[in-house]
Amino acid sequence: MGQNAERGMYLRYRLIAQELLSLGIDGNCAPLLDIMRPQTHPVLRNRCYSDDLQKVISVGHAVARAHVDAGVLPVIKHMPGHGLAQVDSHLDVPRVALDHPTLTATDFAAFRPFADFPLGMTAHLIFDQIDPMPATISSVMNAVIRQEIGFDGLLMTDDISMQALSGSVAERGKRALDAGCDLVLHCNGNLAEMVSIHVACGQLSAQGQARADAALRWRGSPSEVDIAVLEAELEALGGGGIA
């Protein structure tokens, strides 16, 4: 879509959000604000919007606005930045060697314009020069998200069953909450694991509940749109389908 990327991505995600809402789903884990690099692992690279910070921000805003216009809450991810990952965090823990000031000016900077958004997701990777623990279970990296980036919304983990984290899923979930996350996201459908996480993690904290309530207040009513018109415009821009 080239120079029409912002409009094309708005249209694509406005259609996706409309479909989600029609199924009773009022949240979606997008936009993805990770900055692409030549070495970014393919599992993430093909979902990145750009290798340019300002382009990531502008397309990210278009994607977020599309969700909000449809009455669907966006979840910004993967905080504080996953673009430097060279291995698949579903299978192993990525490590980032860049220093803190460089990260502050690049990967972390992509999230600051979204600091007032209501929902965010952490990244399962280690920033070696800041803390030896993966960001999801690191109180130091959670502080980067809360204080340096300025995000005070409801913070969920990436899928806690991904193998970037060690220990049982229950142990991982508890460590994430202790580090500063509000919610534990579990995606693989294993009921026994879900039960173990619930037992270990318990109820949403008072602060987490306040953030959840604020997120729900953030959600608005969907604007009226003509789906056929949006689909035609997207097709004209070269956006193809909406998969």
Image (tube, helix red, strand yellow):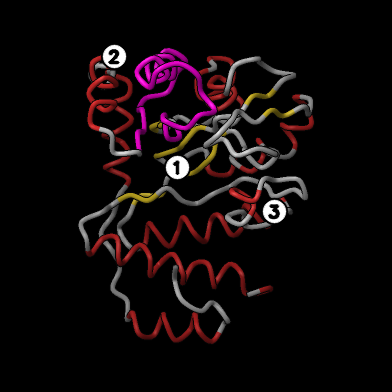
| Residue under numbered circle 2 | 200
Question: Residue 207: where, in percent of width, then height?
Answer: 32, 20
State if disc 2 and disc 3 touch (CB < 8 Å): no
Q: CA distance from mark 3 to mark 2?
A: 41 Å
Residue 40 circle label:
none
Question: Residue 142: where, in percent of width, then height?
Answer: 53, 21
User: Seen in the image, is 50 located left or right of residue 163?
Assistant: right
Secondary structure of the residue carrying numbered label 3:
helix
Q: CA distance from mark 1 to mark 2?
A: 28 Å
Closer to us: 239 or 107: 239
User: Seen in the image, is 49 located left or right of residue 84?
Assistant: left
Closer to us: 122 or 41: 41
Choose top left, top right, bottom left or bottom right for residue 213: top left
Q: CA distance from mark 1 to mark 3?
A: 18 Å
Question: Which contiguous range is marked in magenta?
Answer: 158-187
Residue appearing at x 56%, y 24% in the figure: 135
Question: Residue 233: where, in percent of width, then height?
Answer: 48, 84
Q: Which of pointers 3 and 2 indicates the residue nearer the eye?
A: 2
In the image, is residue 189 above or below residue 10? above
Give, as a three-letter code, the residue at label 2.
Answer: Ala
User: Seen in the image, is 28 located left or right of residue 78?
Assistant: left
Give, as a three-letter code, the residue at label 3.
Answer: Gln
- Viewport quadrant of the C terminus: bottom left
State yes or no: residue 152 in magenta. Answer: no
Give, as a three-letter code, the residue at label 1.
Answer: Phe
Residue 54 circle label:
3
| Residue under numbered circle 1 | 117
Q: Residues within 10 Å of mark 2 (few under 14, many from 20)?
A: some
Q: How would you classify the magenta stretch by its main secondary structure?
A: loop
State if disc 2 and disc 1 touch (CB < 8 Å): no
